[in-house]
Image: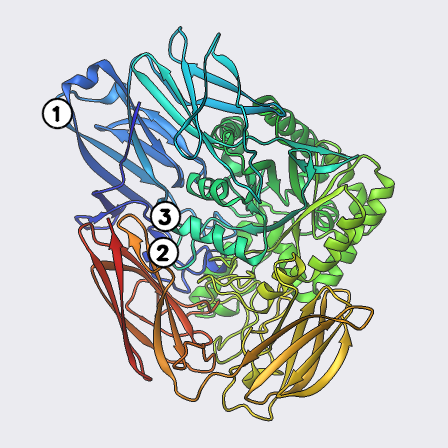
Amino acid sequence: MTATLFNDNWIFTRIGCDSEGEKVDLPHDAMIHEKRSDDALGEHNIGWFEAYDYEYTKTFDVPESWREKTVYFEFEGVYKCAEIFINGEKAAFRPYGYIGFFVCADPFLKYGETNEIKVTVKNSDQPNSRWYSGAGIYRDVLLYVADKRHIKPNGLKIKTLSTAPATVEVTVETTGDGECGLVVFGPDGEKAAESVTCGGKAEIEIQGAELWSPSHPYLYKIKAVYGDDAAESSFGIRTVTCTAERGFEINGERVLINGACIHHDNGILGACAYKTAEERKVRLLKETGYNALRSAHNPCSKALLEACDRLGMLVMDEYVDVWYIHKTEYDYVNYFSEWWDKDLKDMVDKDYNHPCVVMYSTGNEVSETAQKKGIEWTRRMTDYLHALDDTRPVTCGINIFFNFLSSMGFGVYSDKKAKKAAAKAEKAKAEAQRGKKKKKKVGSEFFNTIAGILGDKFMKWGATLHGSDVKTRDAFANMDVAGYNYGILRYEKDLKRYPDRLILGSETFCKDTFAYTKLAEKNKRIIGDFVWAGMDYLGEAGIGAWEYRQYAPAFGSGAGWITAGSGRLDITGRGGGEAAYTRVMYGLDKLAFAAVPVDTAFDRHSPSAWKMTNAKTSWSWNGMNGRKTSVEVYSRDFEVELIINGKSVGVKKIDANGRAVFKTKYYDGKATAVAYGKDGAETACVSMKTAGDETVLSLLPEKEAVTADELCYVRIAYTDADKTVKPLARGDVKIKVTGGRLIALGNGCSYMDISRSYDGDVTDTYYGEALAVIKPFANAETITVSGESPYSDASVEIPVKR
């Protein structure tokens, strides 16, 4: 079977728009190019983008020889309610916007002629998502051509049976009878083993095998040959076990899941799942200290899994955000009961050969789990996943306190509430007061709103109530691992009460990282933690943001707010104090410190329970001498000292969250943090210096060179002559590109005036920085990026490798 990318030269139109259409290449997110306005029915949930229905068409030649072949199209992700037409005939329908699917084209093809494929997507039925979904064909499309006798799509599966000796079971599903030849290759391309299937299966022992793990992501490749057809897949040799006696283990060794939740978007690129963008996201989060990702709250892309396999990042792939109780009026509830089993099978088929995938999640904050019907659904999906794949445990992220609240009727969706809210919205709009209207919050949004008002401590305390236990224990009993959303204060009590329960912090606050690691060190049944969130994302606008008036003139979640602000990394991939804290808590660094922006250190900022700090890892607050600020020092040691220009500010013990906060005055020069053990011995020392007085525009490519099929990321920064970023320097930067196309430009602020977009060639900076993303032209040898700013101009060249 040959596979060909089918991404180029599509014609895209907005349905109902009087236009000839626009030529686009995939992946393509239609929503990111729409305007943002007060009229957006999805409101802050989708970043105030307007939403419509779209159509994609493409012509392709079908030779006569294909009569003797079988032709498939694979769509890795289309949001949403995708209808596929081939030569005017409906060939497929798939409602879920995050699941990949195959379409057999044979009954619809015209041989020896030019054929047409058309894809329609529906996104105008708003609100349908709690976060930015994107719209359109935002992941790859592939064309497969196979002999009539062939290996079925996703028909090659590899399972590790043992690591000593290293033995794998290979299953091959074909369209007919007969044996398959199997050859295993190492990373160097050398043959490592071979065999032949019998009855579609074979066991293969690999001599001297290297095992896959997060610290040693060693990959093999297998090729299956069936007649004239062949299929290939990479795989890793590794086992996963999860028991009350030993906790979570990979290859018989305990591994703590130190994870981060991520949404599917790629920041200023929107939902487009470019391979470069997916790998960059994984790499940046690995560098921040995480060894696992939770694909919240939908199945992730193939490109992300491939990157996780290569880089050694574990994955918990999650199915869905709703079951049969709505969170928004037009969400997936309308299709769940009909499609759940097909969806889960396709998710497992996608994940099966990827060693990075170590766990499945059936849902997120589904308050159905507080009901008898939902408890049965929990068991039903857990059992079904076990039948599809008996090698990986199953969980579900349950918001413990919200289950209790929902059981009493708080925050529960109903069509009546939704219609009432819609009527109020229309009335408010007519009165030009839309920005002041109040809408009923339901589901996870209800909980998030309360958390934003009352803070993380109240929500974690609520999880300790007896009613919260009563409304979760039966559902937890129906899964392999209990997924606790914001339930860290329950851990110790529940370990005693439920001696067989395994606990995973499926969604947690950043400030609890130190406490989690301490608890997990003492008890193997606490297997891991997924912080909300690893990288910031579009939508749920403002929920996690700490912004000052200089960047966000209006607090709340009104039009202008675009990202959640909940990430340890912002949407451009830049980390601040929280990222530095994470690296220390997970052992990548011994010590770090950060300063709250000195110019606004004690000013009012937008509120959020999901932010631990807005401190920046910079001591370049030029011109702020004598201004008061807070300096945070992060360490797992006993106490720390802060020194400014050789003078000690003081010594403090590390608190229960792994940090010490010093209220002090800022002065240009050198700041140093020193960590000490209980015996008083120095264990670590780090320093930061102030940038020079001169301010220039710097264009800083993330890679020295790129290939023609990669994206080129260029950081834009106001710096001194030594490239030290100056966070107080601010001003629009105009970007010009030759040798490629500027496909996204923006900064990491959670607020962006609705008159601006990530589509333009001008961006403001956020604490001195912004980001440009360029797609190389097909025949380009060099990309040249030029920038104009109030401080200076700059230019940089990036070679394109062939």
- Earlier along the polypeptide chain: callout 3 or callout 1? 1
Q: In the rendered structure, which amino acid carries the disc numbered 2?
A: Ile
Q: Earlier in the sequence, mark 2 or mark 3?
A: 2
Nearest to the eye among marks 2 and 3: give it. Answer: 3
In the depicted structure, whether residue 526 falls above or below residue 792: above
What is the tally of numbered marks visible in this picture? 3
Residue 32, numbered label:
2
Tag 1, which secondary structure?
strand
Q: Nearer the viewer, residue 385 or 444?
A: 385
* Mark 1 residue crowding within 10 angstroms, few (<14) / some (14–19) / many (20+): few
Colour basis? rainbow
Query: Which residue is rendered at x = 56% and y = 73% of the image?
Result: 617
- At horizontal 48% and vertical 47% (from top left) the residue drawn is 128
Instruction: Indicate the quadrant where residue 593 lies.
Output: bottom right
Question: What is the secondary structure assignment of the residue under circle 2?
Answer: helix
Residue 129, x across and y down, in percent: 49, 49
* Contact between labelled residues 1 and 3, with CB atoms less than 8 Å apart: no
Along the line of sight, which residue is nearer the eye, 495 or 247? 247
| Viewer-side residue, 239 vs 99 | 239
Identify which residue is drawn at 60% across, 80% down: 604
What amino acid is at disc 1? Glu
Are there few (<14), some (14-19), or many (20+) residues within 10 Å of tag 3? many
Residue 489, image x, y percentages: 79, 54
Q: Which residue is mark 1?
A: 113
Q: Marks 3 and 1, Cα distance to the nearest angstrom?
A: 32 Å
Disc number at residue 274? 3
Does dot 3 land on a helix, a strand or a loop? loop
User: Based on the displayed image, in which of its 4 quarters is residue 455 positioned?
Assistant: bottom right
Give the percent coordinates (x, y) of residue 546: 57, 71
Q: CA distance from mark 2 to mark 3?
A: 15 Å
Callout 3 amino acid: Tyr
- Percent from the top left, x then y, of residue 496? 87, 42
